[in-house]
Amino acid sequence: MSIQAEGIEVAEQPNAKLAADASRVYPQSTNQPSASALAAFGLQKSYGRRRVVDDVSLHVEKGEVVGLLGANGAGKTTTFYMMVGLERPDSGIVSLGDRDVTRLPMYLRARLGLGYLPQEPSVFRKMTAAQNILAVLETMGLRRRERLTRLEELLQEFGIAHVRNTRGDALSGGERRRTEIARALATEPQYILLDEPFAGIDPKAVDDIQNVILYLRNRGIGILVTDHNVRETLGVTDRAYIMADGRIFRSGVPRELTEDAEVRRLYLGEKFRM
């Protein structure tokens, strides 16, 4: 089976090839990605003479939340964008299950089950919350009754039924984020990449968004999160990668990372507390 559009044809990548890449870039002592994981192998990216991402490998499994963190200029945003499809790596592979999706545009990755929530508000401001979700459902080939049933399920599931008729520009920060996440879930993704999910929301809404993320994880969705709000991100992740100078220099569960002397020196600061 292959996907073809705009001159791009990508066949399923044999598991053996991805397994070989995994063995090459992941030491045997670490947890290698499964055959169904969202994974990156040896990503590199340069702008001019400056290499901003240097041999980065990471993976996300279904049903887990993984953080991608680092100071400004560490390379995390470029790495994240290569996973999403907003940037193309100079070398390396991005795989979704047994497919090499490195050259696929975002919309084809979405068809394969990769959702994306950008940092910037992405609701259609002049459309209601319900219309925002319907705009996605109408691209999925569903019958009208099926679309309306799915819409109602999503409105109830994410607690935004009471603002179904509220325009996007009148939603609160938390309501907007919930609408955006519900819209992303309309395509029934296997993985969701969240770019700064805690940006632009009031402190009371942070717990709300954290609970939504955990809810998605419990539904079996794999989630990759990048955010400058370290405490909030580590509070919801199962494990995380820390980047510096274009490389991943530490990975592990939140407690290991917050107690790591080098992580504290280079990124968190000595006074950091969860």
Image: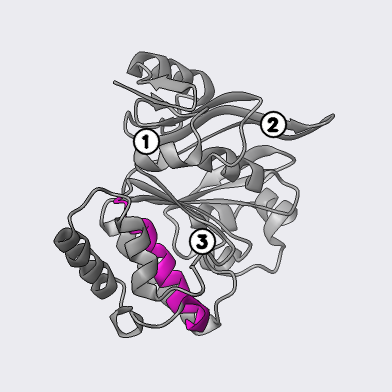
For the C terminus, the image quarter is: bottom right
Mark 2 lies on residue = 45
- Crowding around mark 1 (Cα neighbors within 10 Å: few <14, some 14 to 19, many 20+) is some
Question: In the orientation shown, which residue stands out farthest toward the left?
Answer: 145
Kind of residue at disc 3 = Leu
Residue 133 location in percent, x, y?
A: 35, 65
Question: In the orientation shown, which residue stands out farthest toward the right?
Answer: 49
- Crowding around mark 2 (Cα neighbors within 10 Å: few <14, some 14 to 19, many 20+) is many
Q: Is residue 208 above or below residue 215?
A: below
Kind of residue at disc 1 = Ala
Query: Which span is picked out in magenta?
Result: 168-188
Proximity of marks 3 and 1: CB atoms separated by less than 8 Å: no
Q: Secondary structure at mark 3?
A: helix
Q: Quadrant of residue 72?
A: bottom right
As for residue 174 lying within the magenta part, the answer is yes
Q: Secondary structure at mark 1?
A: loop
Residue 58 location in percent, x, y?
A: 51, 36
Proximity of marks 2 and 1: CB atoms separated by less than 8 Å: no
Query: Which is more N-terminal, label 1 or label 3?
Result: 1
The answer to whether residue 74 is left or right of residue 42 is right
Mark 1 lies on residue = 37
